Structures are given as structure tokens and as C-alpha cells.
Amino acid sequence: MNACVVVPAYNEEKRIGEVLAELVKLEIPIVVVDDGSSDETAQVAGRFNVIVARHMVNLGQGAALRTGTELAMKLGFETIMHFDADGQHDVEIIRPMLDALAKNEHDVIFASRFLGEKLVMPTYKKVILIAAKIFGRVFLQIKFTDPQSGLRAFTAAAYHSLRWRANDFRHCTEILINVARSDLRWRELPTIVRYDSYSTAKAKRPQMRMAWKMLMEALFR
């Protein structure tokens, strides 16, 4: 497939090298968006055969993904995959997700942590995801099994319907809302997420803020 993997990265010099070392083995073009990092993220990424785009200031993961997605489309890629830079995502799920899109039966494929094997994750993460699932079902009327999945693949044609405005972590929910309200054909595939001290410590604070914002928006909508 004419596919591209978009990797948003912010201060990931300690982990992005390991992630890209695995991704390049798939021989799929990669676009890394350095979201205004203050460390050597861009320099580490530049050691690999990937395209590196940079934000001069930190705008947020949603903004980085938008930049990477639109760059991939300008370069002519027909399928875009979103993949995190912190090492949580399983590289092995990429081929099955792209293969599912290649059948032309779906426009968007989401990876779900709640399908397949029993999920083991930090307690705070479970609380946030349970709250997000309730929020999605009650307030937004969306029924995805993983309300905060950042691992997704979609066709370039589908982007016009799922395009998100949120610059921060809320883009995950916005994408699901846009898909649910559109005619896009979507599917979820099971994946395994690896949690360690590095990834959980890095994600905890912004996700807690995101959960609070979602709650406030729901209460005062």
C-alpha cells in the first residue's frame, strides 16, 4: 500500500531511537513531527531514514498529528498511520491494520486495548479510560471499545471527515466523534500496549488534565 506512518514526538530523545529502529524494519515511509522539543528528539530521529518536520514551539500531540498527516497527504500517500514515539505501541499491529484497509471494506481502523488479551495497565490509567468510556457513551453517543486509542490508520480520503481541531490529547475523542457522526466505515482490531515507568510517568499529567477538561465540558455543555 501507498502508506505512511506519522510519529508525533515531544522530548522523546530517550525512546524515539528504539521506536524508529523497529519501525524502519517494516520498510514503510515514516514522518516524524518534533513538536517543539527542548531535547535532541529531532537529531535522534534524523539518524534514521525518515522525514523529520519540526514545530518551533510545542503545540500539542493533536497539532503534531495534524501537521504530519497533512504533510503525508501532500507527499501523495493514500493511507496514514498514527504511531506514538514513547514505545507503548506494538509495531506488529501495523501490517494487520494496513492490510484491513487494503481490502477497501473500511475507511478507518482503530487499535483497541480492550479486545483480545486481558489488559494490564496502571490503576490511574484504568480510571481515566473507564471515565472516558462512560463519557463517550453517555454524552457523545459513541460506542468504541477504546475511547483514547492513539493508534489508528485511515485513508487520505477519510481525513476530510475525521479532521480534528484539538491540539492537545483531546484529539482522540474528537476523532471518534467525527467518525461516529460520519458515513465512514470503521473497525477495531486488538492490540497490546506496553506500559513501563518511562511511558506512564510521561503521560500521567497531561492525561489527568485532559480528563478534567472533558468532565468540565460535559457538565457545562
Image (tube, rainbow, N blue to C red):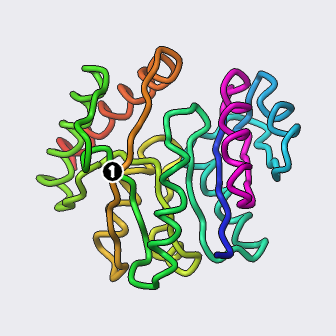
Verify whether residue 15 appears in magenta: yes
Horizontal side, residue 63 vs residue 153: left or right:
right
Residue placed furthest toward the left: 138
Residue corresponding to mark 1: 112
| Image-quadrant location for residue 123 | top left
* Magenta range: 10-34
Q: Where is residue 103 in the image (x, y as percent from the top left)?
A: 46, 82
In the rendered image, residue 1, in percent from the top left (x then y), is placed at: 64, 75
Q: Is residue 187 left or right of residue 198?
A: left
Question: Residue 20: where, in percent of width, then height?
Answer: 71, 40
At x 70% / y 73%, what residue is drawn? 77
Q: Is residue 178 above or below residue 172?
A: below
The structure residue drawn at horizontal position 20% and vertical position 44%, both measured from the top left corner, is 220
Q: Does the magenta stretch include residue 93?
A: no
**Vertical order, 17 against 184 (above or below):** above
- Amino acid marked by disc 1: Ser
Give coordinates of residue 206: x percent, y percent.
Answer: 45, 27
Q: Is mark 1 on a helix, strand or loop?
A: strand
5 on left or right of 136: right
Left or right for 220, reference 22: left
| Camera-nearest residue between 143 and 30 | 30
Q: Nearest the camera: 219 or 4?
A: 4
Residue 43 versus residue 111 in the image, above or below: above
Q: Residue at x 34, y 72 (%)?
A: 186
Numbered marks: total? 1
Give me the residue at 52% from left, 76% from top: 160
Is residue 173 or residue 32 the one in the foreground?
A: 32
Q: How crowded is mark 1: few (under 14 residues within 10 Å), some or many (20 or more)?
A: many
